[in-house]
Structure formats: C-alpha cells, structure tokens
Image (cartoon, rainbow, N blue to C red):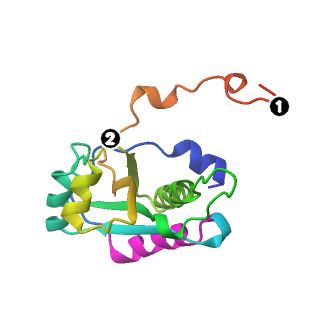
Amino acid sequence: MNFEELAAERFSVRKFEPKHLEQAVIDRILACGHIAPTGCNNQPQRILVLNTDEALEKLKKCTVCHFNAPTAMLVCYNKDESWVRKYDGALSAPVDAAIVTTLMMLAAQSLGVGSCWVMHFDPAAMRTAFHIPENCEPLALLVMGYADKDYAPIEMHEKVRPMEETVFYDSF
C-alpha cells in the first residue's frame, strides 16, 4: 500500500477487540515515532505506554473517550527540551509531539492497528494517575487496538472541505 492509500484508509476507531497489542507491534509503532523530525532534533517527546488492565483502569478515570481500547499511548513533551523561537518565545515541542503522534498513528494503521487521537482528557488527572513530572505536558492520547470486525468509519469521516477552501498560494 502506498502512502496516499494508507492516509486515505486510516480512520478513527472507537470500538476495539479486547486484546492488548503485542510488544513487537508496540515496538514498531514506537520506532516510527522515535524517528520523527523535531525542532533542532531536541526530541522533547515523552511517550507513556498503557498496555495493562491496571493502567487502562487508571486511564478511564482521566477521560471518557477511552473507548475501552486495550492499549493507549499518552504523548507528552518536555518543556525544558523544546527548541525556542528567539523572537517570540514560541516552543516547537507541542508541534514536535504532534508530529510524533501522527507518525505513530500512521504506523499503527500500516500494521493493521486501529487508533483514535484523543484530546478530551484531564491533564491534571493524567499527571496524578501516572506520576507525570511538571516539566512534561500531556498533549495527545492515542487509544489503539485491533478494530472490532464490525466497526466502520463514522459518516463524517468522508466529509472533507474542498481543497480551495484550505490551500492558498502566495497570499490569503
């Protein structure tokens, strides 16, 4: 499958088989996130893998959008390791972590693993439940697993705005 097909076939999965991902599959997904480009190659991402029943029970107290996924990865970034744009102080770390998350989401798809990018979670609850240090900021939660055999993309998955409304050349 080429990249365009992979990107087109990926959709947010919200119903999973009750089977944790195998460590070899997790390792391959993490390897793709590990090689993601980051500002000045600072690699500020920190990834918490949740692949036990106990960890997932804690996760359920931090978000209603867990979809009973058998595996999850919380992508955080270390604020102290971010590249900083000098003229306005903007951090690259949130973007870096988003790139890492995207590559892991696509890697999962390429391995037959469904995922859903979740931002609806309580960062303070995550911090407490998983002992996340203050310098690490939770950014994205990837809930994942093997999609239930009867699950299909929701209707709005196919709805995309015309490219002319989102892409511009030379000026807006």
Residue 82 in percent (x, y) is at 55, 65
Residue 103 in percent (x, y) is at 54, 59
Give the side of residue 140 with respect to residue 72, left or right. Answer: right
Amino acid type indicated by mark 1: Tyr
- Location of the C terminus (image quadrant): top right
Residue 102 in percent (x, y) is at 52, 54
Name the N-terminal-most of marks 1 and 2.
Answer: 2
Front in this rendered view, residue 95 or 57? 95
Amino acid type indicated by mark 2: Tyr
Residue 42, numbered label? none
Front in this rendered view, residue 50 or 169? 169
Residue depicted at x 41% and y 36%: 153
Q: Main secondary structure of the magenta part?
A: helix
Mark 1 Cα-neighbour bin, 10 Å: few <14, some 14–19, many ≥20: few
Give the side of residue 162 with respect to residue 45, left or right. Answer: right
Q: Residue furthest front?
A: 87
Residue 127 colored magenta? no
Where are the magenta residues, as a range?
21-38
Q: Secondary structure at mark 2?
A: loop
User: How many labels were placed on the picture?
Assistant: 2
Where is mark 2, residue-wise?
151
Front in this rendered view, residue 169 or 84? 84
Q: Secondary structure at mark 1?
A: loop
Give the side of residue 28 with respect to residue 121, left or right. Answer: right
Residue depicted at x 68% and y 22%: 165
Where is mark 1, residue-wise?
169
Residue depicted at x 15% and y 65%: 53
**Label 1, label 2: how many angstroms apart (C-alpha)?**
39 Å
C-beta proximity under 8 Å, tags 1 and 2: no
